[in-house]
């Protein structure tokens, strides 16, 4: 395993700064200035660092690995890296591990010997965000004490598909509590159950959210791959901040059944991985029609059973890419990384139309939030009703009351003003909701992404995913510098982010987004870019910059 990792090496991303970087594999990581960090204890190399799904499968087929052995290694790594104390980094990326993981892995080893592997995820440990329901001995709480102990009556569609594919559900990951829909002054990655999740590249930096734990844990090699969820930015932002590939699918490609909701018009689950190929493998398992989620009926005949067949190192050749310049300009170093990335894509055969004009997220005004407030109240009340006696809270109103009664534990840093605003909303038949939803869909689809794609005959639109990770601030909340997630999120269209460089050692990504159901095209583009650049590098666990 070590020889494979050494042969591969890692291309240090210097597009943004041109600066040298310390080796992530060194025993005592150093800062970009060469000054040793104040990390209490060095984070040593790990046998499964940067290993891919394909490599794990090959190891199991050849008898070098077993599913149980792989699971044991990841569980030991979680113990060594994720917890506080003893000089450990204390990532706080895992809320709870699956007490049945080793038994499940052992059963999958036996099955492999008897009948062979079910597919590419057989025996592969997968991390799930703690809003993805599992009907097992793990709870599903969205990080909230109001749902502590809650076990849903049946698996979410996502968990069901993963189990059927032979995956080992390894652990639940920390998140921005309630998927970051509680307060306008929240700190991404903080939940009452999990505490403040940290960025594994620089520990005092934020992992972004709301899929913070999925991003940090996968980047830190605490699991093979992970599941995140997004309403607006919650897959692509933590993927950007943690140096990952993130796929936010078309709404309806992956069922939301059994996932703690925010918005029926924007929510989706998706892969967060270290490579595009792993993301394609995971998406192949997740995609499918589900009667429990009516939105998936639109994916009939549009989803794919194997997204890996679209991965092509020459996938940029002949593609027409539109550069959304209006989404640049929030960070000069990020802009320099994007310029170098665009130049590389031209070299790889892409035709670049620069710029293309889009209706901006700013034009949406308050209509996106208006829709989310209405849908959150309606959909959360439905979700809690389905839980019945499995959770103490039965309605959003109950959750609000619980938070107030447990203020010291639930609201030590920020309040619940979004909950209060949502509770004031009426039913989804209100004209105010219907008007806001229609406005959102017109601006993001017909007058937005669809118009730009049609006008310039584009394969995809290109933009910076976001800025480098900011310093975590529990007093003032998040300090976002900028991003490009909103139009694709509001439209319900796919968005793929890939590492594209770094700023002072902090990863930054590039986003490719396009028409509904265009995941095959976006994955082909992302794969070609990844293979040509290989900007992903494992984190160094620096204490600070």
Image (cartoon, helix red, strand yellow):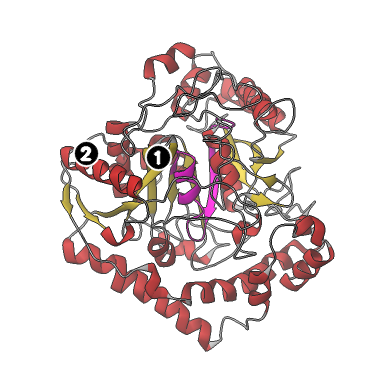
Q: Is residue 436 above or below residue 180?
A: below
Mark yes or no: residue 367 visible: yes
The spot of residue 422 in percent (x, y) is 64, 75
Residue found 75% across the figure and 57% down from its top: 412
The answer to which image quadrant residue 259 occupies is: bottom right
The answer to which image quadrant residue 214 occupies is: top right
Mark yes or no: residue 155 visible: no
The disc, 2 or 1, on the residue closer to the chain's N-terminal end is 2
How many marks on residues? 2
Closer-to-camera residue (482/213): 482
The spot of residue 61 in percent (x, y) is 50, 18
Q: Is residue 433 above or below residue 202?
A: below
What crowding class fits label 2: few (fewer than 14 Cα within 10 Å), some (14-19), or many (20 or more)?
some
Magenta residues (range): 221-245
Marks 2 and 1, Cα distance to the nearest angstrom? 18 Å
**Residue 486 inside the magenta-drawn segment:** no
Left or right of residue 483: residue 518 = left
Residue that lies at the very extreme toward the bottom in this rendered image: 431
What crowding class fits label 1: few (fewer than 14 Cα within 10 Å), some (14-19), or many (20 or more)?
many
**Residue 232 inside the magenta-drawn segment:** yes
Q: Is residue 202 above or below residue 250?
A: above
The spot of residue 487 in percent (x, y) is 38, 64
- Give the foreground label among 2 and 1: 1
Q: Secondary structure at mark 2?
A: helix
For mark 1, what is the residue?
A: 503
The answer to which image quadrant residue 382 occupies is: bottom right
Residue found 68% across the figure and 48% down from its top: 134
Residue found 22% across the figure and 62% down from its top: 356
The spot of residue 327 in percent (x, y) is 33, 59
The image's mark for residue 344 is 2
Left or right of residue 134: residue 430 = left
Closer-to-camera residue (455/324): 324
């Amino acid at each position: 395993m070590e020889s494979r990792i050494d042969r591969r090496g890692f291309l240090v991303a210097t597009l943004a700064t041109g600066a040298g970087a310390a080796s992530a594999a060194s025993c005592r990581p150093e800062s970009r200035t060469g000054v040793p960090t104040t990390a209490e204890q060095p984070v040593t190399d790990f046998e499964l660092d940067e290993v891919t799904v394909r490599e794990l499968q090959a190891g199991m087929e050849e008898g070098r690995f077993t599913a149980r052995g792989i699971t044991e290694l990841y569980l030991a790594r979680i113990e060594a890296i994720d917890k506080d104390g003893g000089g450990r980094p204390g990532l706080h990326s895992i809320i709870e591990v699956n007490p049945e993981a080793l038994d499940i892995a052992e059963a999958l080893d036996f099955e492999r010997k008897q009948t062979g592997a079910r597919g590419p995820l057989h025996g592969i440990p997968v991390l799930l965000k703690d809003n993805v329901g599992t009907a097992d001995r793990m709870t599903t709480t969205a990080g909230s004490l109001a749902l502590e102990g809650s076990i849903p009556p049946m698996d979410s569609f996502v968990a069901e598909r993963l189990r059927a594919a032979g995956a080992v559900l390894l652990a639940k990951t920390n998140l921005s509590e309630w998927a970051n829909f509680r307060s306008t002054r929240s700190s991404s990655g903080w939940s009452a159950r999990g505490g403040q999740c940290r960025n594994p590249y620089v520990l005092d930096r934020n992992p972004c959210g709301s899929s913070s734990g999925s991003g940090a844990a996968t980047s830190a090699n605490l699991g093979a791959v992970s599941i995140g969820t997004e309403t607006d930015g919650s897959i692509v932002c933590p993927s950007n901040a943690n140096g990952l590939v993130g796929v936010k699918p078309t709404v309806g490609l992956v069922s939301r059944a059994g996932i703690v909701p925010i918005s029926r018009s924007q929510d989706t689950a998706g892969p967060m991985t270290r490579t595009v190929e792993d993301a394609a493998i995971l998406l192949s398992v997740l995609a499918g029609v589900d009667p429990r989620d009516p939105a998936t009926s639109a994916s009939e005949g549009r989803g794919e059973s194997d997204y890996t067949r679209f991965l092509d190192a020459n996938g940029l050749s002949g593609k027409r890419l539109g550069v959304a310049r209006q989404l640049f300009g929030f960070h000069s170093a990020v802009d320099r990384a994007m310029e170098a990335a665009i130049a590389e894509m031209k070299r790889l055969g892409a035709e670049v139309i620069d710029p293309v004009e889009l209706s901006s997220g700013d034009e949406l005004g308050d209509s996106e939030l208006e829709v989310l407030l209405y849908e959150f109240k309606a959909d959360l009340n439905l979700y809690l009703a389905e839980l019945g006696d499995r959770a103490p809270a039965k309605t959003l109103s109950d959750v609000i009351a619980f938070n107030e009664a447990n203020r010291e534990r639930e609201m030590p840093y920020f309040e619940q003003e979004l909950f209060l605003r949502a509770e004031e909303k009426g039913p989804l038949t209100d004209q105010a909701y219907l008007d806001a939803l229609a406005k959102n869909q017109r601006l993001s689809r017909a007058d937005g992404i669809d118009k730009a794609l049609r006008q310039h005959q584009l394969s995809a639109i290109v933009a910076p995913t976001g800025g480098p990770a900011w310093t975590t601030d529990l007093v003032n909340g998040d300090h976002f510098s900028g991003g490009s997630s909103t139009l694709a999120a509001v439209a319900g269209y796919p968005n793929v982010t890939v590492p594209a460089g770094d700023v002072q050692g902090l990863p930054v990504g590039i986003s490719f987004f396009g028409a509904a159901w265009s995941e095959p095209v976006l994955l082909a583009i992302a794969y070609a870019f990844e293979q040509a650049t290989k900007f992903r590098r494992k984190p160094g666990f620096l204490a600070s910059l």
